[in-house]
């Protein structure tokens, strides 16, 4: 049986290999800080397996996260000069390959769907081929490997070190912001366990006039957007605001339709995603990858769309949930 954990180890090994490359890259003035940051991340993928099996304490993982926060927060990570092709060579290659460039990208979801829908039913000796409950994540892992192999065939590249160097260059371009969504999602879980949603709900019930469902809808949607702006992730804001207003007020008290309230409420959260630098994977990372002069340019361009969508989401819940 193929376990999902094996792919986590593979991801950790890739991070460790890239950290080793960074440590010897003298074109990066902060090479040791960069190597330490990504090396700690790669090591966590292996150590966490022992923590899950209760063979090792969890505290070192927390220390590693704090060390990574210090390395990123004090700007001890940097970027080297990538050892890659020139812009002219890439333009010529793109013109030669044309639409074939999309084949590796399309391979990933195709393999993932096949694994999640067909391979999940395969058994060998009574054992499932893929670990039960992890078929989708395993499919994504197989898809990534297949996409890499297809890409090397398409561009006629035989050296495995080339994609590793290219991946390291992307990793250095994105920097510590790459980990921000995962950390913020964990923060949302901590807020929910700490009872933040319950306390927000008590305050809201005291402030909201009885029976004013349209005001409650507006508070829920605007609250989702604001919490997402603060936390950077609609999935982190959703449990807090739904426990505070969505479920107890709109659904239980006012008998709103749960699918409409919850699904459109999540969309209201994504309006906040469009206008916050905390949503690094949507706003800051693309700006860094595209080397835009204005790092906050995507956010400025998305503000009008976010405002219009938020108004539409409030109207949709008001019209169709009651």
Image (tube, rainbow, N blue to C red):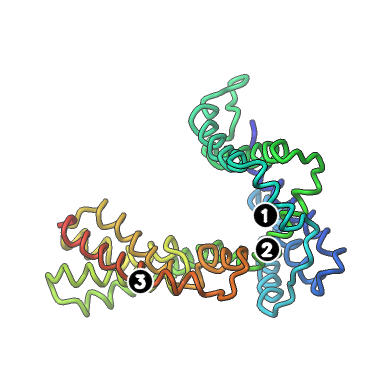
Q: Residue at x 73, y 72 (%)?
A: 77
Reading the image, the residue beneath label 2 is 61
CA separation in Å, label 2 and label 1: 7 Å
| Residue 30, x across and y down, in percent | 79, 73
Quarter of the rendering containing residue 191: bottom left
Reply above or below: 239 against 258. Answer: below
| Residue 17, x across and y down, in percent | 79, 54
Local SS, label 1: helix
Q: Nearer the viewer, residue 303 or 115?
A: 303
Viewed as shown, does residue 266 lie left or right of 9?
A: left
The mark nearer the N terminus, 3 or 2, is 2
The label number, if any, that marks residue 48 in the structure image: 1
Viewed as shown, does residue 250 lie left or right of 277?
A: left
| Residue 78, x across and y down, in percent | 74, 72
The label number, if any, that marks residue 231 in the structure image: none
CA separation in Å, label 3 and label 2: 41 Å
Which quadrant does the C terminus fall into?
bottom left
Is the residue marked by circle 3 packed among few (<14), some (14-19), or many (20+) residues within 10 Å? Answer: few
Q: Residue at x 27, y 60 (%)?
A: 247
Q: Residue at x 80, y 39 (%)?
A: 158
The mark nearer the N terminus, 1 or 3, is 1
Q: Residue at x 56, y 76 (%)?
A: 294
Tell me whether the residue at label 3 lies in contact with that at label 2, contact meaning CB atoms closer than 8 angstroms. no
The extreme top residue here reads: 125
Q: Nearer the viewer, residue 156 or 168?
A: 156
Q: Nearer the viewer, residue 166 or 253?
A: 166
| Residue 82, x across and y down, in percent | 78, 61
Viewed as shown, does residue 73 lie left or right of 301?
A: right
The label number, if any, that marks residue 304 in the structure image: 3
Q: For marks 3 and 2, give the one nearer the viewer.
A: 3
Tell me whether the residue at label 1 lies in contact with that at label 3, contact meaning CB atoms closer than 8 angstroms. no
CA separation in Å, label 1 and label 3: 43 Å
């Amino acid at each position: 049986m193929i376990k999902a954990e094996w792919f986590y180890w593979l991801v950790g090994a890739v991070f460790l290999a890239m950290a080793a490359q960074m440590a010897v890259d003298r074109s990066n003035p902060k090479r040791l800080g960069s190597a330490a940051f990504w090396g700690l991340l790669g090591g966590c993928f292996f150590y966490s397996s022992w923590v899950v099996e209760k063979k090792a304490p969890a505290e070192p993982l927390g220390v590693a996260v704090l060390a990574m926060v210090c390395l990123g927060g004090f700007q001890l990570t940097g970027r080297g000069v990538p050892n890659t092709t020139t812009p002219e060579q890439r333009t010529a290659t793109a013109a030669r390959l044309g639409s074939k460039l999309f084949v590796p990208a399309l391979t990933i979801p195709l393999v993932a769907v096949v694994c999640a829908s067909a391979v999940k039913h395969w058994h060998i000796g009574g054992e499932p081929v893929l670990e039960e409950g992890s078929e989708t994540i395993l499919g994504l892992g197989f898809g990534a490997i297949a996409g890499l192999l297809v890409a090397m065939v398409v561009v006629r590249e035989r050296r495995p070190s080339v994609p590793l160097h290219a991946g390291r260059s992307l990793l250095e371009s994105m920097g510590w912001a790459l980990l921000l969504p995962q950390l913020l999602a964990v923060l949302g879980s901590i807020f929910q366990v700490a009872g933040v949603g319950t306390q927000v709900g008590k305050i809201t019930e005291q402030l909201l006039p009885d029976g004013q469902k349209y005001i409650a809808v507006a508070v829920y949607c605007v609250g989702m957007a604001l919490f997402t702006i603060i936390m950077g992730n609609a999935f982190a804001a959703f449990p807090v605001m739904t426990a505070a207003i969505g479920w107890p007020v709109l659904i239980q008290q006012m008998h709103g339709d749960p699918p409409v309230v919850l699904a459109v409420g999540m969309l209201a959260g994504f309006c906040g995603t469009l206008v916050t630098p905390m949503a690094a994977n949507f706003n800051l990372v693309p700006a860094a990858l595209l080397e835009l002069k204005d790092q906050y340019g995507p956010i400025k361009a998305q503000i009008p769309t976010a405002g219009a969508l938020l108004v539409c989401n409030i109207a949709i819940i008001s019209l169709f949930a009651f």
